[in-house]
Image (cartoon, helix red, strand yellow):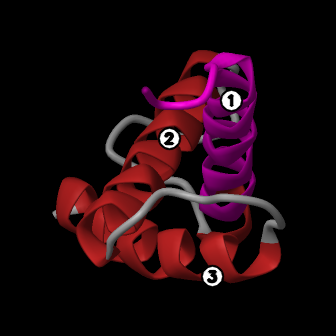
């Protein structure tokens, strides 16, 4: 059940993080949602490793939002390093 909540929270958080960030973001609804879900999973696994969350407990809304922002920041850095498409 914890994984389902992680995915649902990540889905909503990915959309919210997309609206908060500036610059060229991921194109498409599903890629944005996937980044949010990955951010939620990242926050959950890091939180469990640091003993912020118990086993089976997922990241909350704020943790998932921070995880999604971190992944969007990494995404923007990767895009910035890329040259123009030829």
- Residue under label 3: 16
Q: Nearer the viewer, mark 2 or mark 1?
A: 1
Q: Nearer the viewer, residue 41 or 69?
A: 69
Residue 81 sits in quarter: top right
Q: Which residues are magenta?
A: 64-86
What x and y, as percent, mark residue 18? Answer: 63, 72
- Residue under label 2: 44
- Residue under label 1: 74
Determine whether, in the image, residue 32 is placed left or right of residue 77: left
Query: What residue is rendered at 32% in x and 58% in y?
Result: 31
Q: What kind of element bears circle 1?
A: helix
Q: Which one is earlier in the sequence, the residue at label 2 or at label 1? A: 2
Query: What residue is rendered at 19% in x and 65% in y?
Result: 4
Main SS category, magenta section: helix
Q: CA distance from mark 2 to mark 3?
A: 18 Å
Determine whether, in the image, residue 54 is placed left or right of residue 18: left
Label 2 crowding class (10 Å Cα cut-off): few <14, some 14-19, many 20+? Answer: many
What x and y, as percent, mark residue 12? Answer: 45, 82
């Amino acid at each position: 059940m914890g994984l389902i909540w992680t995915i649902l929270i990540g889905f909503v958080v990915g959309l919210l993080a997309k609206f908060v960030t500036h610059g060229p973001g991921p194109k498409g609804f599903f890629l944005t949602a996937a980044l949010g879900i990955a951010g939620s999973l990242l926050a959950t696994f890091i939180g469990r490793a640091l003993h912020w969350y118990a086993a089976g407990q997922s990241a909350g809304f704020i943790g998932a939002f921070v995880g999604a922002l971190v992944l969007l920041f990494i995404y923007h850095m990767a895009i910035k390093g890329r040259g123009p498409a030829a």
